[in-house]
Amino acid sequence: MSSREIALWVDERWYQALSRQWESETVEDKLNDYLNQLIDQLPERVRERISGEIRDEEQQRKQALDAVQKFSAFRVTENGVTEHFRMDRSVGLLETARCVRTTLRQEPGPHPFREMFRRPESITAEEFDTMAAARSAQSCKVAAAFDINFDRMEFSTVHPFTGWATYKLNDVSTAVWYAELAPNEATFFGMERYRYLTKARCYIKHREYHVALLLLGRMLDYSQRYSRPLDMLETLILISICRYRMGSEDWREHFAAALELGAKYGYVAVFVREGAALLPLLERYNHKSVKPDYWEKILSGAVVQAGYYSQYLQPLDSLLTRLTQTETLILRLISQDKSNEEICALLDIKMPTAKTHVRNLFKKLKVSSRIEAQKTAKRLGLI
């Protein structure tokens, strides 16, 4: 049953006079009280019947609302403080990532992530865990559950059935740019070439290597047509990384072309900037045809860059749990088919220590053998 609105018109002078008369109440409140008095004068049987109908209708409305109501749960850690809250609506991954990006780009100072949302409702840690479990079980009531740790720069979300997946916050920020601000390459526009190269890197992070190669192919045509050697060099390097990660041996041909072009103009920085993404190629390339001093500049620069940005261009869905320096070194030795005895000798550690490191490494990589560890490390760009 719908409600009826009653409109009363009164001269403004009467209204002002009545308002002054009733300083503690408004005219509207007085009229509402009088209407309730009139309702109280109705027969008791009529009042009970109508009141019951209104209660039943309100209950039905609430049940209908609850049936379609969705919630989103958040656990947020900032500056050592963890809080839990929920939103009484579905909050998507992109919206949350956009809020993360906004928070990261703000000036230093108190900018609570919670303030990105309107009317958040505080919940307990136990309530958050319950909602996260419901999301994992694909409950229709819980649309999303997020665990965002700004101190550790981690972003976790629950996927139905598969559970938690964790990413780096900077990767999430990149995903927002990729989804909202990246240029559309359907109509290639030369003035957007540097944004195209950035988008190609996003494709690489998403493992969309074929799409990246299509875009890089257009960049290569453009740079050749307009004689832009630096753009061509950067494109060739990214093509080499793509082909290497796809497991294609022709990456060496593209990399050789990049080295030849780079040596012609003395370009070094463009190689160095690719740091951790380029190191696996540098380790496997036969550089006998490259001038030693030029190769040394590229290699040493890339190693330093990789030290600063070890996760650069690491696939978006790769493991987030950081390998220790010793685990990373052991992983490289395993990839060189070194035995535990050889690892002990090279690192000057005891056999139980080596086995513990290998066991922890396998656990983080979610593998059970050295061959699987090599394949996974290569796929994730860790070596």
Image (cartoon, grey):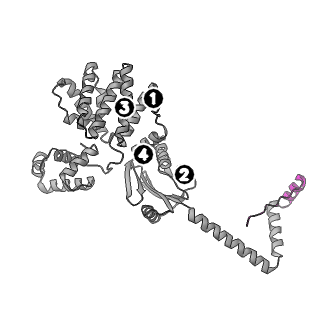
Which residue matches tag 3? 216
Q: Is 167 positioned to the left or the right of 302 in the image?
A: right
Q: Earlier in the sequence, mark 2 or mark 3?
A: 2
- Local crowd size for mark 1, using a 10 Å CA cut-off: few (<14), some (14–19), many (≥20): some
The amino acid pointed to by label 3 is: Leu
The quarter in which the C terminus is drawn is top left
In terms of secondary structure, where does tag 2 sit?
A: loop
Magenta segment: 1-22
Q: Earlier in the sequence, mark 2 or mark 1?
A: 2
Which residue matches tag 2? 117
State the separation of the CA atoms marked 2 and 1: 37 Å
Q: Decide: marks 2, 3 in contact (CB < 8 A)?
A: no
Which residue matches tag 1? 188
The amino acid pointed to by label 4 is: Val
Which residue matches tag 4? 172
The amino acid pointed to by label 1 is: Phe
Q: Decide: marks 4, 1 in contact (CB < 8 A)?
A: no
Q: Between label 2 and label 1, give the one nearer the viewer.
A: 1
State the separation of the CA atoms marked 4 and 3: 23 Å
The quarter in which the N terminus is drawn is bottom right
Q: Earlier in the sequence, mark 2 or mark 4?
A: 2
In terms of secondary structure, where does tag 1 sit?
A: loop
Mark number for residue 283? none
- Local crowd size for mark 2, using a 10 Å CA cut-off: few (<14), some (14–19), many (≥20): few
Q: Position of residue 3 (x, y in %)?
A: 75, 64
The amino acid pointed to by label 2 is: Phe
Q: Is 248 positioned to the left or the right of 92 in the image?
A: left
Q: Position of residue 359 (x, y in %)?
A: 20, 56
